[in-house]
Amino acid sequence: MSAPASPAAGENTLGYAPGYTPGRTLPLRVEIVRQFRRRRTMAMFALLLALPWVLVVAFQFGPGSNGGNSLRLSDLATAGGLNFAAFALSVSASFLLVVAVALFCGDTVASEANWSSLRYLLAAPIPRDRLLRQKLIVALGYSAAAVTVLPLMALLAGTLAFGWNDIRVPGTGEIIAASDVLPKFALVIGYALVSQLVVAAMAFLLSVSTDSPLGAVGGAVGLVIVSSILQAVEALGSFREFLPTFWNTAWLDALSPQPDYSGMIKGVSVSVTYSVILIAFAFRRFRRKDVVS
Amino acid sequence: MTFPGGRRALTAVVALVLVVVGGLAWALWPSGHPVRGQDTAITVVDGPADDQHVTLDATFFPPASGGKAPAVLLAHGFGGSKQSVRDLAVRLSQRGYAVLTWSARGFGRSTGEIALNSPDYEVKDVRQLVDWLAKRPEVRLDRAGDPRVGIAGGSYGGAIALMTAAYDSRIDAIAPEITWNDLADALFPDAGGNGPMNGVFKKMWAGIFFSSGGSDLAPDGGLDAASLAGLSGPSGAAKALTPQQVQCGRFLPAICEMYQTVASTGRATPEAISLLRRSSPSSVPDGIRIPTLLIQGQRDSLFPLGQADANARQIAATGAPVEIAWINGGHDGGDSEPDWVFDRTAGWFDRWLKNSPGTTADANGAGTGTGTGSDAFTVSRDGGRDPGTRQTVLVHAAAGGYPGLSGTDKTTVTLSGPEQQVANPPGGSPASISSVPGFGGLLRSSGGLGVSIDVPGQAAAFESAPLAAPAHVTGSPTVQVKVYGTGEATLFAKLYDSSGGPVAVLPSSLVAPFRVTATEAGTPVTVTLPAIDRTFDAGHRMRVVISTTDLGFSTPAAPAVYRIGLASPELTVPADPALITPSTGPAWWTWALPLAAIVAAAAIVLTRRARPARSAGDRPDLADVPLVITGLGKRYSNGEKAVDDLSFRVDKGQVLGLLGPNGAGKTTTMRMLMGLILPDEGEIRIFGHPVVPGAPVLSRLGSFVEGPGFLPHLSGRANLELYWQATGRPAEDSHLEEALEIAGLGAALERAVRTYSQGMRQRLAIAQAMLGLPDLLVLDEPTNGLDPPQIAEMRKVLKAYAQRGRTVIVSSHLLGEVEQTCSHVVVMHRGRLVSEGPVDGLLGSSTPNGSGHRLEDVFLDLIGESR
C-alpha cells in the first residue's frame, strides 16, 4: 500500500467535485449492466425463452389432432405459429408474466437496500428522484423485454413446429389472414405490456417501501391474486371493471374477426390510472425517506 | 413484509380495504320497502250463460307508496300460476302500483277449467277482477266502478291482456308480451298465405301447450324444459283420475276434443279454427282502443314476430298508440331480458296510467297511432361480447315508427341454384331440425348461434353470391319458388346466413312452413320467410333452403318426391334503416380517470419536495471548512433522541476520531452526514454547503458507513468500476488503481464479491470510499476485520491522506487505534457531545485521578464510567 497521490484541486464554489453533474449520475447503461448479470435476470429470461419450446414438446405428446372440431384456444394452439403464440401469451399472461414483471420492478430498489449498496449510491450522490427514475426505466425495460420475448419466441417456435398459417379464431373457427393479424399481434403485445404496468407500479412502490426484495415481489403478486379473487365476485357488478386485473384478457378481442377495442381502451385507462398514482407515491415516499438499511 | 416507517402505506392499504368493503355493502344492501301481498280468494261467475262459479286464487299487493295508486293486473303464462309473477308484482308495487295477481281458471289453486282465454270464461273472470279492484281503497278510480288499471303478462297472460282490453272499456293500457294475435294461425301457419285451413300443424308446440295445461300438477313456471321434465315424472297424483281427466286434465272438454281431433289428423278443421279464433284478439278487430306496448320475442317459433305485427296493425288501425319491441328471447329461449322488459313495461304504465289524468279508455280517440315516441319500435340486437365479463350483451336499436314486417326499405338479392329433387321420407322421419320446442336453449351453442340440421336428400338449397356489403334484414324476406310433382306437398323454407365456414347459421332457428299442391308444370308459390332482425356480413351468402320435413311440424307420412326450383331468382329483403343503435362511445371514465390520476400524481409528488424549505443558503465563509455541525438533533420514531444538540467542526488536514460507546449516535450522525436520513433539527455543512439528500456537495465526500454494500454477483473490480460510472464522473478522476492498491485484493479482485471474506469486503469498501480521492473521507470502523499489518498500513494511509490537505473522519471502538491515527477527537455519549479537541490536548488536560495518559482512561472518565 502506498499513500495516494497528491490531491486534485477539488474545491469550487458550487460544492461539486470536478466532473460531477447530477444529471449524469447512474446512466441507464450502467444500471442495465448492474442488473443484467444477476442470476435472477438470467434465469427469468431463460425460463421465458424455454417455455414456448416446452409447450411445443408438450403438444407433441397429445393424443394427436382431435379432428380440428374443437374451437377452444388450447385446441387451436397447434393450428400455426400465430395461434401458438396467442395461446402461449394467454397461458402465461395471468401469472408467469406477472411474476416476471413483479420481479424486475419489485426487486430493483429493495435488493439494493438489502445489499446495503443503496446508501453508497445515494451518497455518491445520485439524487433520489433520479435514482428512482433511472431504476424505474430500466426495470420497465426489462419487464417489457420479458413480456415481448415470450410471444416472439412462441411465434418462432410455433412457426417452426406447426408452420406459418393464418390464425383460426377460437369459438367460431373463422380464419383471419396472417398478414392482417401480424400488426394486431404487435398491438396485443403492447396491450399486454400496458396491462402489466399496474403490477410493475405496485411492485415498485413496495420496493421503495421495504428492504426485502421478496416482500416487494410477493406483495405485487399478492395484489394480482386478491384482484383476481375479487373479480370472481359477481355481486360486485360493474365495480369489477375498476379492478386492476379485470381487463387483462381484453387483448383477445383484438384477434377476433371484428376487433373490438373498447375493452382494451378501458383496460389501458384503468392500468394507467393505477400505475401513475402508485408511481407517484413511490417517488413521494422515497424522496424524504430515512435510508437506514 | 415490513414497511419501515410505513404508516403511510398502511393508511393506503386501509383506505383501499374501506373502499372495497364500502362498495360491497353498497352493492349488496337491501333496498326498498318490504312489500307484503294479501292472499285472497275471489269468486267470479262466468260461462256462456253466466252460471259457472269459479274461485280464483289471487294476491293483492298494495302500492308501496301508500295512498291511491293506479292498478296493474299481472297475468301469468301457460302452465304457471300467480306465483310465477310474484317478483314482478313486488317490483311494480314498489314502483307505486296496486298490483293484483291471480291464477287463471284451471291453473294453480283456482278452480274451473281452462278455456284458452275465451270471452265466455277467462275474459269474464278478469272483468270481475276489475270490479274487485274498483272496490279497493288503494286503487285510484277514473269514475265509480272504473279503476285506473293496466294489464301486463306474457304468452297466455299477454293474450288475456289483449282480450280483456277488447271486451272491457275500463282498461286503460296494456303491455302484452310474447303472445298471439290469431291462435289458429299460430298453430297452423302457412307461409304461402292461404290461412290456417291450409296450414301446417305445429305439432310439438301444440303438444306441449296442451299437455302442460292438461295436468293439474303442472309446476309453476310456464313452458320450459323444466316444466316438461316435471310432467314426465310420477307427479304425485294421489287421487284416481277418470280417463277423461287423464286425457284432458283441466281443459274444457270442448277444447280437449278439438285438440284431439286436430292432433290426430294434423289438419285444421273449421270448428277448431273458429274455437281458436274466438280466443284470439284477431276476432275483435276494433276492440282494442287503448295504448298498447307489444313485446315479442325474436326467438319464438310458437308465437313469432308476425303475431305481434298483426296485433300492432289491428290496434293501430283504431288510432290507439302502439309501440312494439322485439326482444332477444322468446319461447325458444335466448335472453328474455327481464330487467329491460320490466323497465319498458313499467315506463309504459307510468306514461299512460300515472300521469295524464285525461287519458282513459274513452279519451284514446286522440291517440296518434304508431310512432308516438322516439322508440316506438325497438329491436334488441347482439352488441357483441362485453369485453369484461365475456358475456353477450344486447343493444337496443330504436326507430320512431314501426314499419311492419315488410320494412321501410326493400332490396333484392339474386339467388341461384338448379331445380333440385327432394324426398319426403316415409313416416316423415328422419326430420330436419330447426328448433326443438321447449328445449330451444339446448340446441344453442355457447356463441348463441342456432344449430340447424338438414337431412341430405330432403332439402333444396339456393344461394346468393357473397354479399358485397353487409345486409341488414329487419322483417320477413320473401322468395318465390316452384314446386313440381304431384299431390299436396308440405315444405319448410329457411333463410341461412352462410359464412363459408363449416356451419351455416339459421337466424333465430325459425322456419316458414307452407303447403302447396304440386303440379308437373310447377306450382308457383310466394313464401314469406320468418321475420328476423339480422345483419348478414359482407362476404357471407344468403342461402334459402326448402326442406320436406321439420321436427316441430306434422308432415305427411306418405313418401313422395318433388322438384323445387326458383320461380324468380329474386329474394326480397326488407330493412329498416331508421333503426338506430344508440352509439356508446367509450365510457367517460376511460379518459377522465387517467387525467385525474395524472393530476393526483402531480399533487402527490409536488406537495413533498425533496429539499426542506428551511434549508439555508450556502455559507461561502465556510467554503474551506470540511465539516460544520450545528445543533444537530434526530429522534427515533419512539421519540427518544438519538442525536441531541450536537455541534462540532472539523478543519482541513485533520484526522478526526469520532468516539463513543454503542448507541452514542455516531452512526446516526454519519448517516445524516451522507444525506441518508434527515435531521429533525440543526444542520450539517460540508464545505459551507448544507447537506440534504442528494446534495451535490456530497460528491466531495467519500464514505464507508456500517459495513460494505456491493452487488454480490459482480467482481470486486466491476463493482468499483460501476460505482464510479454511477457517479457520472470522468473515469480518469477515479484513481481506481490507487484505490485498488489500498484494497490489496490481488487476484481476488476478479472474483464475485459474494465469495469474499469479511475483511476483503471491508478493504474493498474503503477503496470505494477513496475513489476519486474525496476531500472529506468518512470511515466507520475501518479497521474491523483487518489483521494487524493491514491495520498498520491503514493507519499510514489515513495519515498520508490527511497530510495532503484532505480531511478524514474515523469512528472506532479501538481507542488505541484512534490515539495513534487521529489528530483530533470528538467524544459522544447518548447522542450528545461530551468533549472535543486535539488528541494531545485531551490526553494532557485530563488526568484527574493520576492514572496513565491513555485515551481509554480519558474516554471512560468522559462518559462517566470508571473501571
Image (tube, coloured by chain):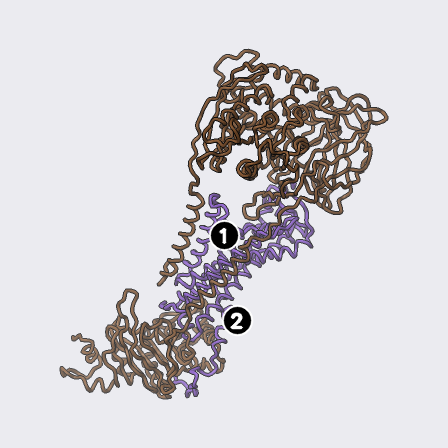
Chain colours: A purple, B brown
Location of the N terminus of chain A by quadrant is bottom left
Q: Are marks 1 and 2 on the same chain?
A: yes
Label 1: which secondary element: helix
Furthest residue to the top?
Answer: B242
Q: Earlier in the sequence, mark 1 or mark 2?
A: 2
Q: Position of residue B334 (x, y in %)?
A: 60, 36
Q: Is residue A212 above or below residue B550?
A: below
Circle 2: residue type:
Arg
Q: Are marks 1 and 2 in contact (CB under 8 Å)?
A: no
Image point (49%, 76%), residue name: A23
Q: Residues within 10 Å of mark 1 (few under 14, many from 20)?
A: some
- Do we see residue B414 in this rendering? yes
Q: Is residue B231 above or below residue B351?
A: above
Q: Position of residue A53 (x, y in %)?
A: 58, 53
Q: Is residue A161 left or right of residue B806?
A: right
Give me the disc on residue A242: 1
Q: Label 2 is found on which chain of the structure?
A: A
Q: Label 1 is found on which chain of the structure?
A: A
Instruction: Quickly name the residue at label 2.
Output: A29
Circle 1: residue type:
Phe
Q: Position of residue B747 (x, y in %)?
A: 44, 74
B793 or B283: nearer the eye? B283
Location of the C terminus of chain A by quadrant is bottom left
Q: Nearer the viewer, mark 1 or mark 2?
A: 1
